[in-house]
Amino acid sequence: DLSHAIDADSDYTDAYLARAYLLFGLNDYPSVVDDLTRVIVLAPETPVAYNLRALSNYSLGRYDQAVADFARTIAYGEASFETYYYQGVCYFSLEKYEKAIQAWSQALELESENVALVVNRASTYLLLEDLPNALADFQTALELDPESSFAHQKMGDIYFQMEELDLALDSYSQAVIWDDSNLSAFFNLGVIQFQLEQHQEAIGSFQAALELDGANQAAHKRLADAYFTVGNYQQAVDE
């Protein structure tokens, strides 16, 4: 077997590589790293070894080492969608958000219709307060998946920040249509309806939020304010 082959010839790189793949399937990532490090010592120009070692280091939470090995894989011209995707995940975990965006942009050049990744990149733009690029990515996500409640909600958040209340209202309304358990969308929908003096609609939205989380104090307060505004004082007191 592979272990015997390695015992017979400690420079048998193919055996180390084959065993590393088997161990990777068994989630034995430390052993994978050991075998692939041996492969790289014996045959430094083996891009698949760098890529698999990077994935193993990622699984072990060793993000710096993983990023370095992904970079070597890319340098050898052997990068795949998986390479760029996980390199981006590692950068994100290291809070290097600009680099995560760069890596995910490379991944999207290979799989442009990967909705989850478009949403990831959009959310990262939001962390950097880059609203135009975040909005563009969420719009792309909705072109690919019009039923994405999360993308509708995040577009609502962006429009809300931009004080585009009518657009925010439409986005949050779509978010709760496609996911009636989206607490944040119901709450923010109610806030905007209240600001637009749609008080009865706001009451309905805050009630929907409280059906999802009855202990939500912010929703209770907002609902009380809405009841008070329409003259329903007893219910305002009860809230």
Image (tube, grey):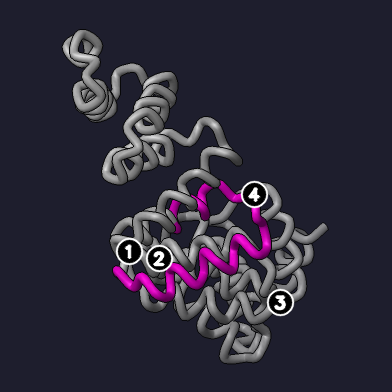
Q: Disc 3 marks which residue?
A: 13
Which part of the image, by quadrant, shows the N terminus?
bottom right
Q: Foreground: 226 or 21?
A: 226
Q: Amino acid at mark 2?
A: Thr
Which secondary structure, mark 4?
loop
Nearer the observer: mark 1 or 4; the answer is 4
Relative to 210, is 51 above or below? below
Instruction: Name the residue at the right extreme.
Output: 1
The span shown in magenta is 129-155
Q: Are marks 2 and 1 in contact (CB under 8 Å)?
A: yes
Residue 147 - label = 4
Which secondary structure, mark 2?
helix
Residue 170 image offset from top left, x and y in percent: 48, 51
| Separation of residues labelled 3 and 2 (CA atoms) | 40 Å
| Separation of residues labelled 1 and 4 (CA atoms) | 23 Å
| Separation of residues labelled 3 and 4 (CA atoms) | 49 Å
Which secondary structure, mark 1?
helix
Instruction: Name the residue at the front extreme.
Output: 231
Q: Disc 2 marks which residue?
A: 124
Residue 127 - label = 1
Q: Is residue 32 visible?
A: no
| Separation of residues labelled 4 and 2 (CA atoms) | 21 Å
Which mark is first along the chain, 4 or 1?
Answer: 1
Q: Residue at x 59, y 83 (%)?
A: 73
| Separation of residues labelled 1 and 3 (CA atoms) | 44 Å
Q: Is residue 212 visible?
A: yes
Magenta includes 84? no
Q: Amino acid at mark 4?
A: Glu
Which mark is first along the chain, 3 or 1?
Answer: 3
| Separation of residues labelled 2 and 1 (CA atoms) | 5 Å
